[in-house]
Amino acid sequence: MHAFLPACALLLLAAAQPVRAQEDPLKSPACGAALASLQAARSQGEAAARVETLRSAAASTCLGSGTVPTRLSRVVQAPVVVPPPQVEVTPTAPPSLPAPTPLPPPVAIERLPLPSTCDATGCWTNDGTHLRHVPPNLMGPGGLCSQLGGMVYCP
């Protein structure tokens, strides 16, 4: 605990020391003079080569670098190419379905015979059956028939 207190005191002392600020080249008097001479050359309409030389000198003075920054490096840089993702799909067999059951045969709908022609002995139906005339009814192969409207019902 006793060693901790001196260490904290040293840290506080170091933090209290004034830190020497680095000089900003944009706020230097040399930068102001270079910009003023560049502005004067532009306003007087001097030759483009002279203006370019003053601009280059102002840039190196104010930006603190010997080279003039350009945007060409951003254009010349190759675009970043990201390859498409590779997804491996493993083929799987489709789920096995039960074999389809065959459809049942169609249901035969028995149509009632319709009398097509009648005479004194009986009537002939549209299916070719002869119904004998037993007054007042008709007699089919299975017994007496009943008539309802134009339909004949025979057993």
Image: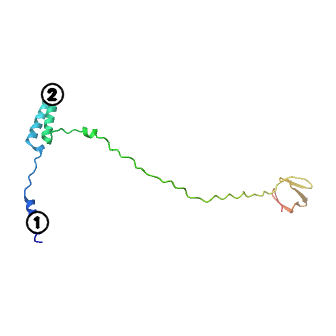
The quadrant of the rendering that contains the C terminus is: bottom right
Q: Which residue is mark 2?
A: 47
- Secondary structure at badge 2 equals loop
Q: Amino acid at mark 2?
A: Ala
Q: Mark 1–mark 2 contact, CB under 8 Å?
A: no
Q: Quadrant of residue 10?
A: bottom left
The answer to which image quadrant residue 78 occupies is: top left
Q: In terms of secondary structure, where does tag 1 sit? A: helix
Colour scheme in the image?
A: rainbow
Residue 25: give x, y in percent of width and height.
12, 44
Q: Amino acid at mark 1?
A: Ala
Q: Mark 1 vs mark 2: which is more N-terminal?
A: 1
Q: Is residue 104 left or right of residue 65?
A: right
Marks 1 and 2, how far apart in space?
64 Å
Residue 75 position, x and y percent, is 28, 39
Residue at position x 8%, y 40% from top?
A: 30
Whole-percent x, y for residue 79 in the image: 32, 42
The local crowd at label 1, few if under 14, some if 14 to 19, many if 20 or more residues have their Cα within 10 Å, is few
Q: Which residue appears at 12% of the width and 39% of the height?
A: 61
Exactly how many numbered labels are in the figure? 2
Q: Which mark is residue 48?
A: none
Quadrant in the picture for residue 17: bottom left
Q: Residues within 10 Å of mark 2 (few under 14, many from 20)?
A: few
**Of the pair 39 and 131, the residue shown nearer to us:** 39
The residue drawn where x is 13% and y is 37% is 58
Q: Which is more toward the observer, 120 or 99?
A: 99
Query: Pointer 1: what residue?
Result: 7
